[in-house]
Image (tube, rainbow, N blue to C red):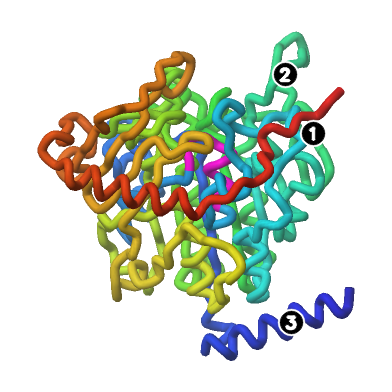
Amino acid sequence: MFRRIFFLFISSFLTMIIHGRDKKDLPNFIIILCDDLGYGDIGVYGHPTIRTSNIDRLAEEGQKWTSFYTAASVSSPSRAGLITGRLPVRYGMCHDSIRVLTPNSSGGLPQSEITIAEQLKKGGYTTACIGKWHLGHLRQFLPLNNGFDYFYGLPYSNGGMTRKVVNGKAVYDVPLIRGNDEIERPVDQSTLTKRYTEEALKFIKQNSDKHFFLYLAHTMPHVPLSRSEDFADVSLRGLYGDAVEEIDWSVGEIIKELKELGIDKNTLVVFTSDNGPWVTQKLNGGSAGILSGEKGNTFEGGLRVPALFWWPGTIRPDVIMNAATTMDLFPTFSALAGIPMPKDKIYDGYDLSKVIDGTGSSERDVVFYYRGTRVFAVRKGEFKAHFITKTAYGVMDERVLDQPLLFNLNHDPAEQFNLAKEYPEIISEIRNVLREHLNTLTEVENQHEKIIRK
């Protein structure tokens, strides 16, 4: 144990010397991730009846990104991409029919992957995961075995798979975990957002004199929707709006704590969502706003999500229209912390640090829209080509298109006007990009296929 601590200290010290960053100059990092929050579900992105003044203030004082994407349109692979900076297909964290991990899954994030928490610990960061994990519920896959010093939250979706009767009411049998230990089952979901916030504030205060990384992954507004008594019937949007407005309160509490502790100017906060809205849930689901599509499919509403970057004194308020993804956070945080990127893997993220400080633009020109293990669409520059289309859930209507659909996303973000006949050369160019990308993939063990045998 002593040798390991000594090695980490020496490694961190050498990293800072090599990259010329004094330890006191290293920023803190906070990712606030919502679950199923749609592109059109907060005020600054156009929702007319959900009040999100604290979230909107992040945009007013920071950067609002208009073309920010996730690695997948459903939870487990999306979170895997964010945590690793790599497409989930590279390490078996996606599947064409078993789309997310369940309580019956025996697989999870492979130990061979380097998480963003493990990467930052090389620079001496203290790390915490608070909220929904969904990258494997067996002990070896939980956050404490993937670079996080602290975990408080749910191992998988709040809907789970089974229900039990408590006080005459059927509830989802989902556990709340602290560290590696179950502390409540079934969890009282009505107080989750409040308790996550309390845990986050405690972590920030306890580590205000250190460099920390907080991954706050809210359970809401994923169904079953819930909110505390303080937020019952506060929103014109009903229960869904109540859940989002409680998250907005949570954001406000975190920003207030950073300011009171005097570390706001040394903290980068990123607010985003794991995928688009679950439209099939009707009034219990959200909105993709102007975008077509939804959670589960590969039109824009499935993977394009709200994204706000806040860092007082470093970020100049702006609207960023460059394309970027959650996978870009891994190399961006690495660059800002002065930690070299690992050399033994292909990474799918790009360093956004020059966009953040206003000295450059994103190098990302291509976005791959995966559904399971296959690419259904590709964006290159302003154009997006759909090679396969399929309804998000339920209907088996997959279409492999002989003539791909082509949209100019700058002119037509709603994907209404097919330009394939006008620009065959662009489709050919995008086909070549896809072919080159597929040549970088290798066969790996699929984690979603692993099932607990009872």
Tell me: 239 left or right of 140.
Answer: left
Residue 195 in sight: no
Identify the mark at residue 162; answer none if there is no mark.
Answer: 2
The Cα–Cα distance between marks 2 and 1, rounded to whole angstroms, is 16 Å
Quadrant position of the N terminus in the picture: bottom right
Asked if residue 355 is positioned above or below residue 447 in the image, the reply reads: below
Q: Where does the magenta region start and end?
A: 72-82
Identify the mark at residue 184; answer none if there is no mark.
Answer: 1
Q: Residues within 10 Å of mark 3 (few under 14, many from 20)?
A: some
Disc 3 secondary structure class: helix
Q: How far from the left and from the top, in percent, is residue 33?
A: 51, 46
Asked if residue 261 is positioned above or below residue 76 in the image, the reply reads: below
Q: How far from the left and from the top, in percent, is residue 296?
A: 46, 29
Dividing the picture into quarters, in which one does residue 236 lie?
top left
Dividing the picture into quarters, in which one does residue 413 lie?
top left
Residue type, mark 2 in image: Thr
Q: Verify whether residue 35 appears in magenta.
A: no
Dividing the picture into quarters, in which one does residue 414 lie?
top left
The residue beneath circle 3 is 9
